[in-house]
Amino acid sequence: MSRVSDYAFVNAKLRARIGIMHDRTLFDEMIKSPSLTEAFAKLDGTRHQDLLEVYRKTGDLQQIELKMLEDEIALYREVEGYLPSLPSEFVRVLLEKIEVDNVKNVIRLWYSDVIRHHIISYRSSYIYKGEIVHKIDYDGAINASSYQELVRAFHSTPYEPVLSRFSMETLASNGLFQLEIAIDHMWFSHLQKGIGMLKGQDRKTAEKIYNVDVDLKNILMLTRYSYSYHLSPEELEKVIIPMGYIAMEAEKTGALKSDDPIAVLSVIVRHHYPQISEEIARIRRTADDLTTVEENNREIVLIEAYLAERRKKEYRRILMGDPFSIGVVLAYFFLCLQEDQNLRRILSGKYYGCSEESIREGLGL
């Protein structure tokens, strides 16, 4: 099979949908709506109409969130079904990221109940409990009375060996931070393996997109955790994702073992990502000073904004380039999830009575 035959149908279908997505009229009308109910009414006749039906039946914004998650899972599965084997398997890895986030939400609920002794019964109804990629006993996890029971709920999945490295005692004393990092690293290892299985242009496209994503995620984590949370070099090594340029250079230069990892990291960033080198340079040790924490947070927000803008530009470039590669599929997923994120922000803003100006600011409009 040729790349043309592999991608001609799916990319034509997805490009047609992408063309509709670029119309911002819907979101503009929703932002201008005087109430949440009237904002929802604007979804009538759109691809998001099913959200309007859920709102009419329940009036519950968290049920809307659950429905959006169901729709996102269905979107990945639909596209997966259009693709030949290797790209299809890669899409399944991307779908696993949605599962990872769902798993972390389930573990947080269990942690709130068993370790923090909070009431979670009302929150558990908003968890997606269907099979995403792996067969998981979500009810068994949420209702587990011991850590061993929690681990059993993930039997024969990639999460079981990760969870088995921890215990009730370590989570009670240290929280969920290290466990969640370990789950994230598990997924990134699957991502790296999935990219390695792709061929030719597909592999080059995926490498370019996700290596930059990982680089910027590593920069954000290192700036947060070394300065704001004072993690030790050993802890920083557990946080950094072993993938991409930043991780490779940090290991080569010994940045994580230095007294001031951000100073060493700044040189690496300046060489490869000069657009954010000034933000990195302005980040300072907090010494638990709230003013410095706030200043650092502002710089981190600017780095996150750069990441978002870089993603947009890369996907725009892909859409203008080779139509017969996995790039159009990845651009479609990105644009769909971005549209859903904007929709969530608008509905949340309306729910909390935010002004039009603040909602637009949150969307970067």
Image: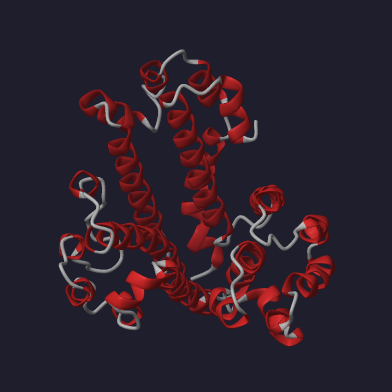
Q: What residue lies at 30% left-to-right and 79% top-to-bottom?
A: 167
* Residue 123 seen in the current view: yes
From the viewer's perspective, tell me whether residue 303 is left or right of residue 95. right
In the rendered image, residue 111, in percent from the top left (x then y), is placed at 29, 62
User: Which quadrant of the figure contains the C terminus?
Assistant: top right
Q: Based on the displayed image, in which of its 4 quarters is residue 83 positioned?
A: bottom left
From the viewer's perspective, tell me whether residue 352 is left or right of residue 133. right
**Which one is in front, 136 or 87?**
136
From the viewer's perspective, tell me whether residue 131 is left or right of residue 283. left
In the rendered image, residue 283, in percent from the top left (x then y), is placed at 75, 58
Q: What residue lies at 30% left-to-right and 63% top-to-bottom?
A: 107
In the rendered image, residue 359, in percent from the top left (x then y), is placed at 56, 28
In this rendering, is residue 81 above or below 72? below
Q: Based on the displayed image, in which of its 4 quarters is residue 286 positioned?
A: bottom right
**Which one is in front, 6 or 221?**
221
* Residue 158 seen in the current view: no
Q: What residue lies at 21% left-to-right and 77% top-to-bottom?
A: 155
From the viewer's perspective, tell me whether residue 186 is left or right of residue 133. right
